[in-house]
Amino acid sequence: MRIVHLLLTSSFAGSERHAIELANAQSQHHEVTLVLRRSVRSGMPGGYAHRVDPRVKVLWVGRWLGRWQARRLVRQLRPDVAHAHLSDGSKALGGAPDLRSRVLRVATLHMRYKPQQHAHLDALVAIAPWQLDAIPSPLREHTAQIDNWTLPYRPAADARQRLRAEHGIASDAWVFGSMGRMERTKGFDLLVDAFERAALPGAHLVLVGQGAELEALRQRNVPGVLLPGFCEQPQDWMAAFDGFISAAREESFGLVFLEAMAAGLPIIATETLGAKHLSAALDARMVPLEDVGAMADALRAMYAQRPHRSNRSMERFSIDAKLSELEAFYRRETALAGVEPCAPKMHQR
């Protein structure tokens, strides 16, 4: 198939990782193009284009006219499937009704269904069952629920020792960790409050990521709290953690949960919709939303018990399984829409 992904964002987090991993994996057997903003070119602050597989063709659009330029590219390329990720990509495709029946216009719901972004598309991919309820019934019939995935856990061999040494953390210190985009929905402010209240001797809290709230959190200067910023290799920090904590106010799925599970970390999580969806596999201590006292109690309990890492089965969340589900969905929906897919392109390894 000929597939175009639209990712019109300016920073890198879990949704961007999902889109790029998907494009990279699909490029093994299909002709894949990725439309990105010029601001994320390699070498630019926050750039993430270097993560794209060489087999994926990258096309660039600007910031101000990005949606219009992306629509024009899709019209020129005439792929079988145009797959949008996040707000601007979805709006770009939704604003091209002339593509109906010529190109299947799909979007992944990385957060929740939003009519202004998704109502005019042909099909949707929901990453969690709870998202389905808000989708209008005609469009819901063209929606597939496909879980996120995670790649195999392969941190650098020296990651734990190296990162702890670089940041002055003792090899035997207990380290709580969390990561994600530094924004209010992720609840990092609540987690810092809970850690400060728990008052655990010698413990550390490491919050990895970048975003609007990073500097405000740093300015609080809470003892034991480390905010190293963006990390190119999050699996290395997972190796340095002893426990993973999510204090999110909202979490649609929580790709970071899969990364923590793959690393075998014990987990504490707030009762977001995403955490509830994964609860059976997550095996986490669940904490009420925005309850600093309950989170502090959970931190104290983990600190006292010092649970070991455990091996969790990640087969359900393998990328190969999800690729098969998604391709079957593409083929079903292109047939229903009257789009004629081309033969798969097989790449030489």
Image (spheres, grey):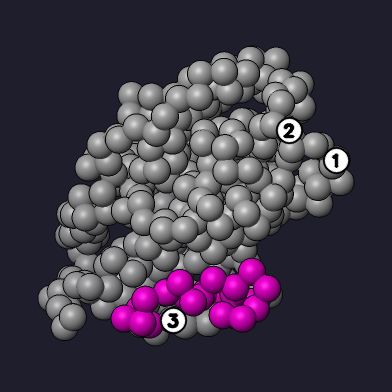
Q: Determine the secondary structure under disc 3.
A: strand
Instruction: Give the extent of the magenta segment.
Output: 35-57
**Looking at the image, is mark 3 or mark 1 nearer the viewer?**
1
The location of residue 105, given as percent across then percent down, is 37, 62
The location of residue 187, given as percent across then percent down, is 67, 35
| 2 and 1 marks in contact (CB < 8 Å) | yes
Vertical comparison of 131 with 60: above or below: above
| Distance between the alpha carbons at the discs numbered 3 and 2 | 39 Å
Q: Earlier in the sequence, mark 3 or mark 2?
A: 3
**In this figure, which residue is indicated by the disc labeled 3?**
58
Q: Nearer the viewer, residue 299 or 186?
A: 299
**Residue at position x 63%, y 43% from top?**
170
Q: Which circle marks residue 83 in the picture?
A: none
Q: Which circle marks residue 192 in the picture?
A: 2
Is 49 magenta? The answer is: yes
Q: Nearer the viewer, residue 241 or 54?
A: 241
**Residue at position x 81%, y 47% from top?**
218
Vertical comparison of 63 with 152: above or below: below
**Residue at position x 51%, y 75% from top?**
49
Q: Is residue 37 shown left or right of residue 99?
A: right
Q: Earlier in the sequence, mark 3 or mark 1?
A: 3
**In this figure, which residue is indicated by the disc labeled 1?**
220
Estimate how packed mark 3 is, as few (under 14), some (14 to 19) or many (20 or more) residues with alpha carbons within 10 Å.
some
The location of residue 242, given as percent across then percent down, is 51, 36
Tell me which amino acid carries mark 3. Val
| Distance between the alpha carbons at the discs numbered 2 and 1 | 9 Å
Work out which quarter of the rendered image holds the N terminus and state it. bottom left
The image quarter containing residue 302 is top right
Is 178 magenta? The answer is: no
Q: Determine the secondary structure under disc 1.
A: helix
* Residue 275 visible in the picture: no
